[in-house]
Amino acid sequence: MTNPLLAERTQPFELPNFDAVTDGDFAPAFETALAAARAEIDAIAHCPEPATFANTIEALELAGKELSDVLSVFYLLSSVDSTPEREALQRDFSPRLAEYSTDVALNEALYARVEALWQQREDLGLTEEQNRVLYLSHRSFLRAGAALDEEGRARLREINTRLAELGTSFGQNLLADERDWFMDLDAAALKGLPAFVADAARAAGEERGAEGPIVTLSRSLIVPFLQFSPRRDMREKAYEAWTSRGANGGETDNRALAAEMLRLRAEQAALLGYDSYAAYKLETEMARTPERVRELLMAVWEPAKARADGDAAWLERMLVADGEDMPLRPWDWRYYAEKRRKAEHDLDETELKPFLQLDRMIEAAFACATRLFGLEFLPLDVPLHHPDARAWEVRRDGQHLAVFIGDYFARSGKRSGAWCTALRSQQKLAGDIRPHVLNVCNFAKPAKGAPALLSYDDARTLFHEFGHALHQMLSNVTYESISGTSVSRDFVELPSQLFEHWLEVPEVLAEFATHADTGERMPEEMLERVRAAAIFDMGFQTVEYVASAIVDLEFHDGPPPADPMQKQAEVLERIGMPEAIRMRHATPHFAHVFSGGYYASAYYSYMWSEVMDADAFAAFEEAGSPFDPETAESLEANVLSSGGSQEPDVLYRAFRGRLPGVEALLKGRGLAPAA
């Protein structure tokens, strides 16, 4: 029988044959597809004809499609429904894929063809987009070590393979800690918890097969527990479990893995001729240098820390008033911040959540995309990777544009956090290929028959990830290597963070924030309270994020630390980290940086993009409407559809006319000094 991963796709819009795939199909499909990819690369490298853009660069663009198709399905299932079998396959595939990628990057014959084209680029008659793809391809070979001597290339192979192994182990260890831990809640522990938290705890218990309600390490459950549980002892137990993921000793401890990865990254950068891994990594980002990143982070750190210190004094007074022992601890912050928010803004999460139904927030995101970009979303009844997932066909002017898939609920075996990915990216080289885009979240699943309710942060996350999806769906380039979100890390978060602003548009909440029980719209006075509270506790949120970004930068800018935990402590002490706040991502569970390393040296990028997103939304405000059609058209033309076809600062200037300063970010977070 034909392997369903390699067979012709018979599902609508060539979606994967999810209903036919079994775990036993992955290994043989991987072997076949990897061999085919190697053969394609070999044919390009040893083509008897002189190098041309078509037989070299475009051929590389098209090579490995079968392997990409197999891996897109495998890694989706591994991240949203991990099993021991899939984890074993991942440990096998990861170093072999690193070896394959290194073999391509260090292929002397292949690099010689790319180098020949680069030297002839002025005479090739290339389009602007083709010139960009050639430039990026040539740069990629150089940065991967193609110009190294034989000894250097051999060592780089070893480093790349080992880093792949370590990144896989880091992520699997983290998932194991998240999957294995839970805390039972008896009747006494449920007292004081809002109904939506208690219901989520019962649903989590059912999903885990526990005897009753439980708290897990899913953010959408543990955060509301920390916000509302009056039991300080249980908050401490849950918080410490949450923040000690990857640092519990034994087989799942990530500390030694992080130290080895930092050493190998520093060696990799030195081999390639850079002063540090940060210098190597940031060369291709908008920031360009570690110094510019540090300048941004410290410009935000000082006002954020001042605000957080002032807030801590308020919360500590509330702690004392409750008869608790000093001082304010990290597991106390969210509890007293929630009480303060209710007191100052008369806004209670319990009161707010019934108005933020998951289905209505999905509708809201779709409606904003319709008004801004003319998109239509039609439900699709197709087999997907999990029963909780759902799909829509995306159209514009009656034409098919994309397939969008949402997988919104937390479950055991699903990687924590939220992300956007693509099973297939937009391109035109192999025909008019339209994308298959997924948003994955970890919202608390409701009891059977009950509506799923979101916190305001959850709703913001939904809009954030949908902004990434729009970047993929509206892509309009010829080459997949520059399609959609294939842009620098400190630009990729611009569309996602920008789209969050539409959640705060009053008319959006007025239409879609309807009560789960009564169907009534959110009252006008509550809308005002929501808007007034939008920047509440921003000192805390900014400090925990910026601290993580600073530690990430310091890990990679200079000699690698022998003991990352000691280095982390030294950095936090130097910047004056408030005692009642911890890093958003401590080193042992800093998956952004160590589970694959996409954000290594680049966790700052969310804030770099936020400098732009605050300024970009101001363009709509200056035009007089958050749905101004001319501004939306410019945003799509210059940012969302362009992918990596030009440098990001060029794209942003084309949209806005200039680059922004940090002032808009500080104002948006309520951290700007009083006028």
Image (tube, helix red, strand yellow):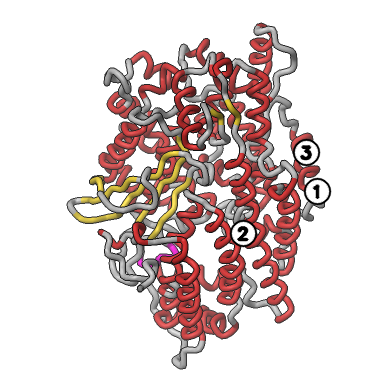
Residue 99 x/y as whole percent: 60, 72
Q: Residues within 10 Å of mark 3 (few under 14, many from 20)?
A: few
Report if the CB atoms under discs 1 and 3 are less than 8 Å apart.
no
Q: Secondary structure at mark 3?
A: helix
Q: Is residue 514 magenta?
A: no
Quickly name the residue at label 2. Answer: 283
Residue drawn at 41 percent across, 57 percent down: 643
Q: Secondary structure at mark 2?
A: loop
Q: Nearer the viewer, residue 94 or 261?
A: 94
Tell me which label, 3 or 2, sits earlier in the chain: 2
Q: Is residue 580 left or right of residue 143?
A: right
Q: Residue furthest left?
A: 398
Residue drawn at 50 percent across, 36 percent down: 209
Residue 596 x/y as whole percent: 60, 56
Residue drawn at 61 percent across, 37 percent down: 181
Q: Is residue 479 magenta?
A: yes
Tell me which label, 1 or 3, sits earlier in the chain: 1
Q: Is residue 662 left or right of residue 266?
A: left
Under mark 1, the amino acid is: Asp
Quickly name the residue at label 3. Answer: 569
Under mark 2, the amino acid is: Glu
Under mark 3, the amino acid is: Ala
Residue 586 seen in the current view: yes
Q: Quadrant of the C terminus?
A: top right
Residue 212 x/y as whole percent: 52, 27
Q: Quadrant of the N terminus?
A: bottom left
Q: Residues within 10 Å of mark 2 (few under 14, many from 20)?
A: some
- The magenta span reads 478-482
Quarter of the image holding residue 131? bottom left
Which numbered marker is on residue 563? Answer: 1
Residue 540 x/y as whole percent: 61, 27
